[in-house]
Amino acid sequence: MNALRDAIDSATAVFADAGIDSARYDAEELAAHAAGTDRGRLALLDPPGDVFFGRYRELVAARRSRIPLQHLVGTAAFGPVTLHVGPGVFIPRPETEAMLEWVLKAARTQGFPPPSVIVDACTGSGALAIALAASLPDARVLAVDDSLTALSYAQRNCADTSVELIRADVTAPGVLSELAGRVDLLVSNPPYIPEGAELDPEVAQHDPAHALFGGPDGMSVITPLAALAARLLRPGGLFAVEHDDTTAAATVETVCSTGSFDHVVSRSDLTGRPRFVTAVRNG
């Protein structure tokens, strides 16, 4: 066990030197992954052998090169669910959990009458859709994305759920027209980073650009999403959309400019940064 602890300590130092903020956590997660156990059970392991240490060295070298931890272990936690992720699909972030929590609280307070309809636009790995379906089991949840690679991950993640996957471009005119006026909740974590923004290597080199960038001002997907929400939501339906922390005011203005929403509010994530806007369909 001393050899394992020493290896984890060494990996922690390597990651810290590489500028990785979560150095200790990542070192322990990779050790658990190499050993086929959970991080909390590392102290209970029998002394590992050469096979483990060889594998662990490979994982540490890969993480040191800034390959995302989630790509190395193959999964990412989001709210109440664990998702399969890898190259070609956006890794869900803890910041989005603040929007998930707000949406669930609002849905329960408002009491959507079953069968309620929820749309997760730009679903990526299916994170929001699956978490919503798990928490609102009576709802019909549709997850929409235009990326075949992202949908392949979402299909795997949704295999044991009731989530329905749809391949579509949410910015296209008339998309999802069959749902006009019938949706209770539209939620989205769309591409919203302004082009040219500085990003960590894990993001810039490994998250798909299609899922990151929202044009020069970060609004190229949010603007048509606001129009889509106005078209699909029933009166009293809820809209929640994530945005860059520099575009809170622009997102509020865009949602208000549709003339279709009341109670348009900018809300912060768990770190206190402006992160998402919510609104209620009027009429």
Image: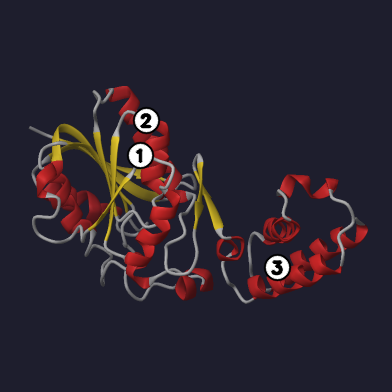
Residue type at tag 3: Ala
User: Where is the N terminus found, in terms of image quarters?
Assistant: bottom right
For mark 3, give the secondary structure. helix
Q: Can residue 142 be seen in this view?
A: yes
Residue hosting label 3: 16
Disc 2 crowd rating (10 Å Cα; few below 14, some 14-19, many 20+) is some
Disc 1/disc 2 C-alpha distance (Å): 8 Å
x and y, in percent, of residue 112 in the image: 26, 26
Q: Is residue 137 above or below residue 57?
A: above
x and y, in percent, of residue 262 in the image: 16, 36
Residue hosting label 1: 162
Disc 1 crowd rating (10 Å Cα; few below 14, some 14-19, many 20+) is some
x and y, in percent, of residue 60 in the image: 71, 70
Q: Can residue 125 be seen in this view?
A: no
- Residue 37 lies left or right of residue 92; in this view the side is right
- Residue 148 lies left or right of residue 64; in this view the side is left
**In this rendering, the label closer to the viewer, 1 or 2:** 1
Q: Residue furthest front?
A: 159
For mark 2, give the secondary structure. loop
User: Where is the C terminus found, in terms of image quarters?
Assistant: top left
Residue hosting label 2: 137
Disc 1/disc 3 C-alpha distance (Å): 42 Å
Q: Looking at the image, do the residues carrying marks 3 and 2 touch, with CB atoms under 8 Å apart?
A: no
**In this rendering, the label closer to the viewer, 3 or 2:** 2
Q: Looking at the image, do the residues carrying marks 1 and 2 touch, with CB atoms under 8 Å apart?
A: yes
Disc 3 crowd rating (10 Å Cα; few below 14, some 14-19, many 20+) is some
Q: Which residue is drawn at 80% across and 62% down?
A: 8
For mark 1, give the secondary structure. loop
Residue type at tag 1: Ser
Q: Residue at x 45, y 44 (%)?
A: 97
